[in-house]
Image (cartoon, grey):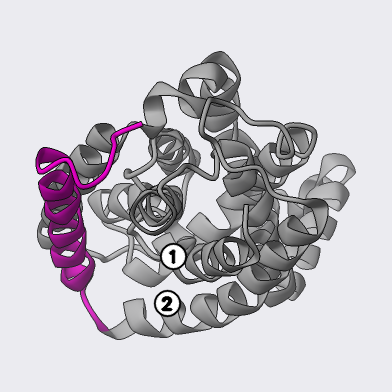
Amino acid sequence: MTWVEAIVLGIVQGLTEFLPVSSSGHLRITSAIFFDRDAGASFTAVTQLGTEAAVLIYFAKDIWRITRTWLVGIRDKSVRSSLDYRMGWYVIVGSIPIGLFGFVFKDQIKTAGRNLWVVATTLIVFAFVLAFAEYWGRQTRTLENFRMKDGIVMGFAQAMALVPGVSRSGGTLTAGLLLNLTREAAARYSFLLAIPAVVMSGVFSLGDVFEPSAPGTSVPTVAQTIVATVIAFGIGYAAIAWLLRYVAHHTLYVFVLYRVALGTLVLALLLTGTISAT
């Protein structure tokens, strides 16, 4: 991996991690178009630690309050009806699907799931799913109305994002809208839900990031990985603030159009032989 590649991929990771456009898909596409190789699933997972660190800092007060209330609630029944205590369980239970599927299909995620035909197709297909959710969802429920079934449904939606092109935030936002949550409520839970999965994925991938997962995979140095992760953190922090403001006042249709356009472009490049699918 070159330094230019590491810096560009760090920027792409920070810009796209929290948008419903698939950061892993963007890293795969960017690598194929501009660098003619794949940075690998492990590099993606490790740089996501940077954007997840941004979540930890941005939501530090919320995370501390939820964690403290949840721990107290294990012993004290009087706090168990509070949203913070319940949210602790919602995040824990909602994280189970992606942990289970990630473990079972870890080899496919690193190989077949990164095929650009798959990425382009999922970008387009799930764009229409997101559009339907935006159109159909009544957006009448806030986090105060959040229930365990909502956490489970959004947890399974997050698990679908193991396939590059689906988008973790796109999947959870779509599920939230279909559950009639407001966009802002769905986004906030989505940020919290991602923490266990992304952190564990990044930690477990640290040992693999400096080894090629497949022929032709780009291998970064320790310094390049650190720089890309730090860049992803800085840009990701700004992206969180922007997205929360945006979803409070705008629909998600702009991301639908973007996904369709990008997916179509990638399909065209594949059909003309400009880029390779693997």
24 to 109, vertically: above or below: below
SS label for mark 1 = helix
Is the stretch drawn in magenta largely helix, strand or loop? helix
Q: Position of residue 7 (x, y in %)?
A: 60, 69
Q: Residues within 10 Å of mark 2 (few under 14, many from 20)?
A: some
Q: Residue at x 47, y 64 (%)?
A: 18
Residue 231, quarter of the rendered image: bottom right
Which of these two is toward me, 248 or 122?
Answer: 122
Residue stretch in magenta: 250-278
Which is more N-terminal, label 1 or label 2? 1
93 to 255, vertically: above or below: above
Q: Position of residue 236 (x, y in %)?
A: 57, 72
Q: Position of residue 40 (x, y in %)?
A: 55, 39
Q: Residue at x 52, y 75 (%)?
A: 240
65 to 78, vertically: above or below: below
- Mark nearest the camera among 2 and 1 is 1
Q: Which residue is mark 1?
A: 16
Find residue 86 and name its label. Answer: none
Find residue 243 and name its label. Answer: 2
Horizontally, residue 182 falls left or right of residue 47, namely: left
